[in-house]
Amino acid sequence: MSLQIDLTFDDTTYRHYTNGFLTVMHCHHYMTLATRLAEQFSDLGGERILAESAEDALRPLLDDYIQKHGISDPDERLKIGQEYYAAIGMGKMAASGDSHSGSVTLTHSHIDQGWVMKWGERPTPMNYWTQGYIAAMFGAAFDKPPRSFAVEERESLVSGAPHSTFLVTAK
Amino acid sequence: MTVQRDVVVKKLADIKAVGNEEGLIPAFNVLVNNLPAAFWNTFTVRMMEAAPAERKQEMEDALMHCANVCGYNTGYGIITSKEFQDVVTPMVTEGAKDVLRGAYAVFTAWGWAKSGIAQIKEGERMVVRAMDYYEADMKPGYMMGFMVRGVSAAFFDLAYGEPYPNGGNTFRCEQVKGMEVGDPFGEFVVTRTDSPS
Amino acid sequence: MAENSTQILQDLINSSGARAAVVVARDGFVIETAGMLGSLDLDTLGASVAMLLTGAESMGNELRIAAFHTLTLEASNAMIMCTPVGDALLVVLAPDSKTLGMIRLQVKKHVPQLVQFF
């Protein structure tokens, strides 16, 4: 099946909704600066906070969609997660795996490409947001609670690699 | 004649931000994302909560800076966009003040904050009121309109600071009222960075 | 001096017998409201006031008269008075024109206080 996106607008509050969830547009400047802010406050756990905030805020969208459309097959659920990632402008990903482990590659990435546009390449990965998203996606696919999956970014578009690679492991 | 906010909102509110075949949304000279507001709010509150008392101000400034740079760059992309030129520019009769009115109408139409200008002293000071903004959805016990603050300072800079891209730090913005702390609206005051607080 | 514009608007309503007072920016943005507005759609009100303002200014230009300082609309079941306040417009709503004199007086008294906010 292919992801269905329903964009609506409330003309009283002027808020926009994606499949019933309040969403807001922002630019790569905002997202990459938030990423840099997380690193700036690394001693406070900034990168973890960024990833967990993504996991916790995106998981309800995935769960809601899966439930409303009665999708039970984990592979189909992963596919919905990939399509949602693209629909909200975060890039193009391919994911595979089971409830124990998996891998994800990104061929296009809002955050990595945005970072390169803004500051150029860097030697180390920094896509914490996507780590959180992948954790949410695997959690939704395999009916696991939040923080069930550890996600590690092994190589990255931001470092000049042809694609970003994430390894997923059940905790 | 001045910018008719209602006209701008009605014409621009039906924007559809969906990723292309690469999963990206290129627009206004930037890459756009369309994330749940809950993500931005959760991230902001958790970062603020993680900061010890002596670093709260540093965290606030950093959060506002993100929005300020975003507002400066994307704001420029918006006011030079075809959409703005087609819808807003024909109604601009009062120069920078009208461009600002148009910018807040777009800011409203595209869902950042139902906001507008309450008072303006050109090039010096601006008071913005927001009747609905997603940052007010959290009730952390303190004012957290960092996005509206950063973007408001950026918009004023685009209107009255050095020509883009050489401005960006001419103005600051303080939040004096917030729906998130029980006020009926959010109020944001933009002043020059070189003026006394 | 009143601490905020909400207090001033509320005082204006209390002292004049008006039903509500609304401050609308020139672009139609509703900046502030006070009093009994019921189910009134404020965005529509703001847009209408902005159009009214545009029309009044256009008429003033055509007739070569100075900027207006009061615009009063009287209907069988409502009285609406518009007065510039700074860069915005104060709109006072009353159920009828019986209290028009008092409203005029109180608007004149309160506008100088409101100007500092708009």
Image: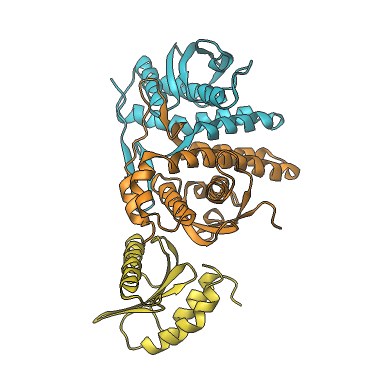
Q: Can see residue A143?
A: no
Image point 31% across, 42% down: which residue? B14
Rendered view: A151 above or below B181: above
Q: Residue furthest right?
A: B54
Q: Position of residue A119 (x, y in %)?
A: 60, 25
Q: Which chain is cyan?
A: A
User: Left of C10 or right of it: where is B46?
Assistant: right
Image point 38% across, 56% down: which residue? B3
Where residue A70 sits, quadrant-wise, is: top left
Tell me, what hue is chain C?
A: yellow
Tell me, what hue is chain B?
A: orange
* Figure quadrant of the N terminus of chain A: top left
Q: In this rendered view, identify the residue nearer to me: B129 or A76.
A: B129
* Figure quadrant of the C terminus of chain A: top right
Q: Position of residue B156 (x, y in %)?
A: 55, 51
User: Left of C79 or right of it: where is C21?
Assistant: right
Rendered view: C118 above or below B150: below
User: Left of B184 or right of it: where is C74?
Assistant: left
Rendered view: C100 above or below A136: below
Q: Position of residue C50 (x, y in %)?
A: 35, 64
Q: In this rendered view, identify the residue nearer to me: A117 or C58.
A: C58
User: Left of A66 or right of it: where is A110?
Assistant: right
